[in-house]
Amino acid sequence: MSRLNCPFCQIEEQQIIFQNELVISFRDGFPISPRHTLIIPKRHIASFFELTAQEHQALFEALHILKTEIDQEFTPDGYNIGINDGLAAGQTVMHLHVHLIPRYKGDCTDPRGGVRWIFPEKAAYWL
Ligand code: AMP
Ligand code: ZN
């Protein structure tokens, strides 16, 4: 996936909800919860591990600002913060993005385990 066919390199100005010098943020196009938000580096890189120290800092600053905004607007009860890094880990858009996923009490039957549910048969370690 090059810049030319990368959906995140085609994000339009009006979709951007926050940006700083190095990262931009917009709502996920197929949200799994209200205010599901993505944060990406402006630079087209695939992996979290390619971030420079400055991009890393800019990304985490944005994460905190966006979380505070969502808290004020929707008062979620928790968050999942996630990166699918690499095809084997489920990444479908090969431009690094951090998922900021607000969670709401009762939004699923039993939220315990969170990201462990990528392997449902191993998730419930407490049973
Ligand atoms: P991942 O599986 O982590 O690569 O997730 C890709 C995410 O990008 C998914 O949550 C999609 O809903 C989201 N997505 C894909 N295309 C677009 C798009 N054009 N605009 C906004 N979000 C998108
Ligand atoms: Zn891109």
Image: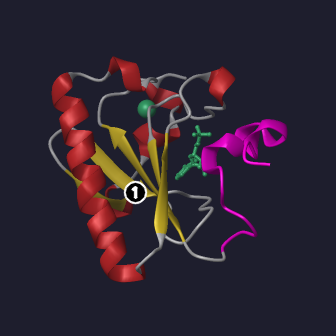
CB at disc 1 and ligand 1 closer than 8 Å: yes
The reply to whether the magenta stretch includes residue 118 is yes
Give the left or right position of residue 25, taking residue 105 as reference: left
Give the left or right position of residue 50, taking residue 99 as reference: left
**Which quadrant does ligand 2 occupy?**
top left
Where 77 falls versus 67 (above or below)? below
Q: Range of the magenta residues?
A: 107-127
Q: How is the image coloured?
A: secondary structure
Residue type pointed to by label 1: Phe
Mark 1 residue crowding within 10 angstroms, few (<14) / some (14–19) / many (20+): many
Image quarter (top left, top right, bottom left or bottom right) of the N terminus: top right
Q: Nearer the viewer, residue 96 or 71?
A: 71
Q: Residue furthest front?
A: 127
What residue is shown at x 66% (from left), y 77% (from top)?
Answer: 106
Reading the image, the residue beneath label 1 is: 26
What residue is shown at x 72% (from left), y 39% (from top)?
Answer: 118
**Image coordinates for residue 18, horizontal then vertical, percent:** 26, 58
**Image coordinates for residue 12, horizontal then vertical, percent:** 38, 54
